[in-house]
Amino acid sequence: MSRIGKKPVIIPSGVKVELKGQTLSVTGPKGTLELEVHPKVKLNVTAAEVNVEISNKESKREKALWGLFRSLVQNMVDGVAKGFEKKLEVIGVGFKVDSKKADEYRKFYTGKKADAIKQGNPTLENVANYSLAKLANLSGMVIEMQLGFSHPVFAEVPAALTAVVEKNFITITGASKQAVGQFAAEIRELKKPEPYKGKGIKYSDETVIRKVGKVVKVVGGRK
């Protein structure tokens, strides 16, 4: 038997769980999540708990589905009740991070472009043109990062998530554990922490294994 699958999912106060056909809907203070249930998995929903069952407890595949769907349902209940959070830290001299609406960034870089043309500064104009091109199809909230490149890096925050920027920290929250984890991983991938100086983007609770740089030995020399 699956040690995880056989445990009931307790429904906390303020959370509503509904099953229509093979679609499970969970609603709570943090939002609503839906899940398509595998045909070999059966959910028994009551006012107090959700029990996950399978027909063939001897099948390896079905036992795997048993534990998987029990975990998914638990994550949905926890997500709409309390939410999930991932915190990232941006480390590096000159590295900066900010967050604004896409329209505000477009207005800012349009002004930068006008200033660059007025000053006859082609480098600044190229940065403004690049930024405006990247922002063209973005809407809603956008995270802007200066990560040591010749241009800023932009990441649009998914509608179901919230991203708060405080100094060099980015806190991502949302009801879906998968969505929060996926977006945090995408941000980290933009500049993974390097092992020598630790520069880059890392999870706040992540330990970066550091390496010692090469030591150049002087051979010979004056006496």
Image (spheres, rainbow, N blue to C red):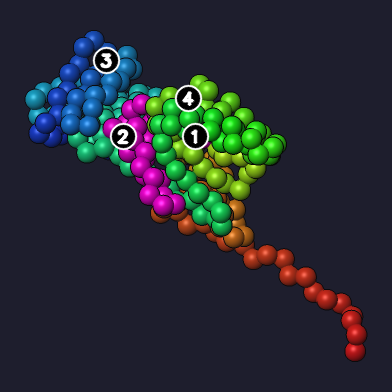
Residue 78 drawn in magenta: no
Residue type for callout 3: Thr
Judged from this view, the residue extending furthest toward the bottom is 223
Q: Nearer the viewer, residue 7 or 37?
A: 37
User: Where does the image place residue 164, in percent across and percent down from the top left?
Assistant: 35, 42
Q: CA distance from mark 2 to mark 3?
A: 21 Å
Q: Residue at x 23, y 20 (%)?
A: 25
Crowding at dot 3, Cα within 10 Å, few <14 / some 14-19 / many 20+, comes out as few
Mark positioned earlier in the residue sequence (2 or 3):
3
Mark positioned earlier in the residue sequence (1 or 2):
1
Mark positioned earlier in the residue sequence (4 or 2):
4
User: Where does the image place residue 68, in percent across and percent down from the top left?
Assistant: 34, 30
Q: Which residues are magenta?
A: 154-183
**Residue linked to disc 3:** 23
Compared to residue 65, the image places residue 79 above or below, namely below
**Residue linked to disc 1:** 108
**Residue linked to disc 2:** 174
Q: CA distance from mark 3 to mark 4?
A: 31 Å
Q: CA distance from mark 1 to mark 4?
A: 15 Å
Residue type for callout 2: Gly
The reply to whether callout 3 and callout 4 are in contact (CB within 8 Å) is no
Mark positioned earlier in the residue sequence (3 or 4):
3
The reply to whether callout 2 and callout 3 are in contact (CB within 8 Å) is no
Q: CA distance from mark 4 to mark 2?
A: 20 Å
**Residue linked to disc 4:** 138
